[in-house]
Image (cartoon, rainbow, N blue to C red):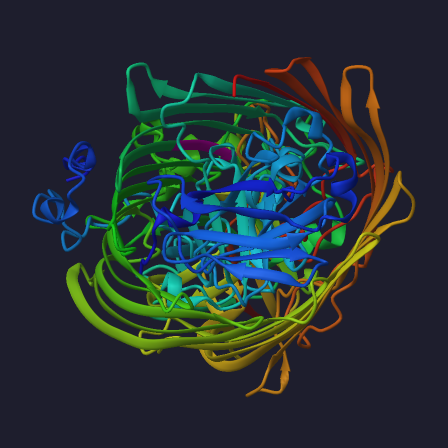
Amino acid sequence: MAIYRNRYKSVIVLKVVTFCLLLLAPVPVAWAQKEACDCFVKGVVRDKHTGQPIPGATIAVLGENKGVSTDINGRYQIERLCPGQYELECRIIGYQPYTETIDLVAGHEENFTLAEDEIHLKDVEITAHRTDAPLSQPISTLTGSDLAQTRGQSLAESLKGITGVTTLQTGSNIAKPVIHGLHSNRVLIMNNGVRQEGQQWGSEHAPEIDPFVATRVTVVKGAAGVRFGSDAIGGVILVEPEELPIGKALSGELNTVGYSNGRQGVVSGTLQGGVKGVEELGWRAQGTFKRGGNIHTPNYFLDNTGSRERNFSVAAGYRKKGFGAEVFYSHFDTQLGIFSGAHIGSVTDLLQVIKNREPLVKSGFSYTIARPYQDVAHNLVKGEAHYHFADGHRIQWVSAWQHNERSEYDLHRPRNDSLAGLNRPELTFRLTTFTNDIVWDHKPIANKMAGQVGISTLYQYNLMNGRPLIPNFDQLNVGAFLIERLVQNGWEWEAGIRYDYRYLTTYRLVNRVTQRDEFRFSSASGTLGVTRSISEKLSTRLNVGTAWRAPNVSELFSAGVHHGAASYEEGDPTLRPEQAINTVASVVYDNDKFNWEIGAYHNYIARYIYLKPQPEPILTVRGAFPYFRYTQTDATFTGIDASLGWKLTDRWSLKSKGSYLRVYDQKNDQYLVMIPPNRWDNQLSFNIGEVGRWQKLFVSAGNLWVGEQRRVPANSDFAPPPPAYSLWNLTAGGTLFITQKQQVEVGVTVHNLLDTAYRDYLNRFRYYADEMGRNISLRLKWKFGA
Amino acid sequence: MLMKVECRMLGWGLLMSTALLLTDCRRADEVDPQDENELITTVRLNFTEQGTTTVNTFEFRDPDGEGGNAPTRFDQIKLKPNTAYNLTVELLDESKTPVVDLTEEIDEKADEHLMVYTATPASLLTYTYGDKDSRNFPIGLTGTAQTGTAGMGKLKVQLRHQPPVNGTAVKNGTAAPGSDDVNLDFELIVE
């Protein structure tokens, strides 16, 4: 169910005007500044789109115990400040907090005379990002240089650095994000404000998104079903492009990334600007090309693991006074080679590969993508319009059309030559989705309470060709929600409720006759959260949220041998929706030397759908396969995410991140399969700073330790989980200023420095081959214009 | 039937998706007849005692392919001890009408297929290939089976699919390359 808006990327400008008023006194100015604590800061908080004032924002001077709220006109004023440097923090409901350093040193007294109004005036521009993410839930955002360091990687790979986020892989080039042990249909991706609709149910179906479109990627950890609708059981990933450059000058950037392993190259460029003479318009065009060949493990090449990607997007927007409209189109196109050594015909084949410890076919390097491979294209057309009413209300409408076409080519072509000559995919899915969302933000009540109410609809249909796997279907979803947020005396409360209804019809051939099945699912979701700022350094958050997920068509109807897994999997049309209740508590501490965050979560998922091993195998012409049936149980996902940043000296700093997760099947009193093992990530950095025209120069060394997953059910797998592994990496980077308006960001990283041979439990090809060996990457980002 | 017009381009320019709902050309309820690719539903082993014309046929049969209904036939192979048989194999796709005989296609693509017959215990039956592909490697569509002394066990019948990797032939006369297209453990009784 889609409730979305791209509002979280809208930007406000907090225009701060600081005044240092010197008392009219018959004393020399130089003396007055020492004792006169009569400086004040004042200004207006406005929305950048519209220039409308935002009432109810909190402005605090950190360390001074002073804070005020903006009035109905967005104005605020903080008085009785001594000259000096201050941290000014702006918090607005629905926005991520923002701090800015302001300088109230009255060092320019010579510039003014008593006759000239006795003021010292300074403009500080603060931009804060508005967010639709629940404020009381843990959020991690990748942006700026953190995001730049992940450039060239797939979306899932680039999120790996976030505590509590891992990947589910199929070989080396297909990765899906895993949040707190949940993935696929249990993680929702909002691509530019639109709910991403591909064939997410498949563990080898990676998100069809070009990360270069985004300048911010935010991960909301935990169930967030109220704001985002069904499927947000494990969390939500918000992929957000930059605000359109309405009325701005031409600017752009060019990214190039090269990887030694797979000899992969990535080029991505962006060009954007306004339109001369039409202040209200802005546009952006962006494109990415990526090509990689066979991946090398420490000891051998993996045959047919090349990939190719060609993506582009265009956007244009218009803003005038309270009105804004935007259109966006993106095209994503990828061909992914699938390691040919992972093709097996029978259980005997699989056991043979596991026994050999390495693949039979070890090819050399090649860029050729041969069978088996996937060919996936995703198109998104989005239109958005919003209007700010003069009295503070706001309404937004987002409408989107998505078309996802996925073709899968098996290793073997048909034996029949005339069929083989057609080189058709053995499987094709075509999924078309229309979504519409309308959200109304009401004006703040008594400057304390803000909220929104929304309705969203989704209509979707799926067409299948080839090997029977999932049925054709169409479905209609309708959802409505209400969220209110209240800020009072250092407490921020958040509460919301939602109701969703889904009507699904499936069409499949049973004995050559089309059979139609109807399903109706509905569910209510709720969220309740509170954030408490104990001091400016310490804050705590608590959130209880629910989310639901209807069984997907593969869970209802799949029937067949899953080739990568050498198992026979069968759906169950009587499955009921899953319901998650997620409790997250976290404490954040931040001072000059230390910052740490510790979060604990407990996600109870009622009617959790999983593949349950059945006692009798299924006999096929290729022998007997272990038989699994989609079954429901009650599962708990309990874990801790912890991170620490420690500034050892001015130059040395340490970052440490750890995550622990325990997943238990409460009904059957055992562990569940395919849960990420515990991990600990450490990074020691040396900050060189400025050298000549170079800035932000740094060198860092890191280690990632991933434990062995010992919490697995007995006799549930062909091979035990792989042992623990430890990987080292080295990174160096900096920014070269060519001119003030042109800069080149350079980064070099060596992944898997010691060329360690290892296997990862969450790689579905762990039976067949080792993971990627050493990989050296070079990133260059050239930026020009604003 | 295959190339129905799909109106994916309609999304262009028509952002008002309520309108789009009404203009969808292809509908989900028109299910495409699945899968023109062949399926091996039936493996038929024909044992002809040498010097006679008596054919003993043993069959594995799963007419709807893997899953769905269980296999309808999985015969016990009953043979005389110390007897030489000519053995031919037939592979059929009985899910199609008319039935597709895949044996011919395998013969045409003999360079990438190998039948493997393995008796356990090995003393029950010895198989000798009676055919060769263009590179002089055995195929196993015809051959001879010599039974040993009386006993009970299994006869594993495999069709190894061994297509070229990166344009290089991998079939080398052994079972190792490729993957199983057929892997059946017939019960074998020599009495």
Secondary structure, magenta segment, majority class: strand
The residue lying toward the viewer, choosing from B63 and A668, is A668
Q: Can residue A767 be seen in this view?
A: yes
Percent x, y of residue A767:
67, 53
Q: Is residue A57 above or below residue B187?
A: above
The residue lying toward the viewer, choosing from A688 and A203, is A688
Percent x, y of residue A616:
51, 77
Q: Which residue is drawn at 91% across and 48% down?
A: A648
- Name the quadrant of the N terminus of chain A: bottom left
Whether the magenta-drawn stretch holds residue A177 is answered as no
The residue lying toward the viewer, choosing from B126 and A267, is A267
Percent x, y of residue A771:
72, 43
Left or right: A749, with B135 as reference point: right
Which stretch is magenta?
A: A332-336
Which corner quadrant of the image does residue A17 belong to?
top right
Q: Farthest residue toward the front?
A: A26
Left or right: A375, with A60 as reference point: left
Which corner quadrant of the image does residue A668 belong to?
bottom right
Q: Residue at x 35, y 56 (%)?
A: A469
Percent x, y of residue A779:
68, 24
Which corner quadrant of the image does residue A392 belong to?
bottom left
Q: In this view, does A662 lie above or below B160?
A: below
Q: Is residue A490 above or below residue A318?
A: below
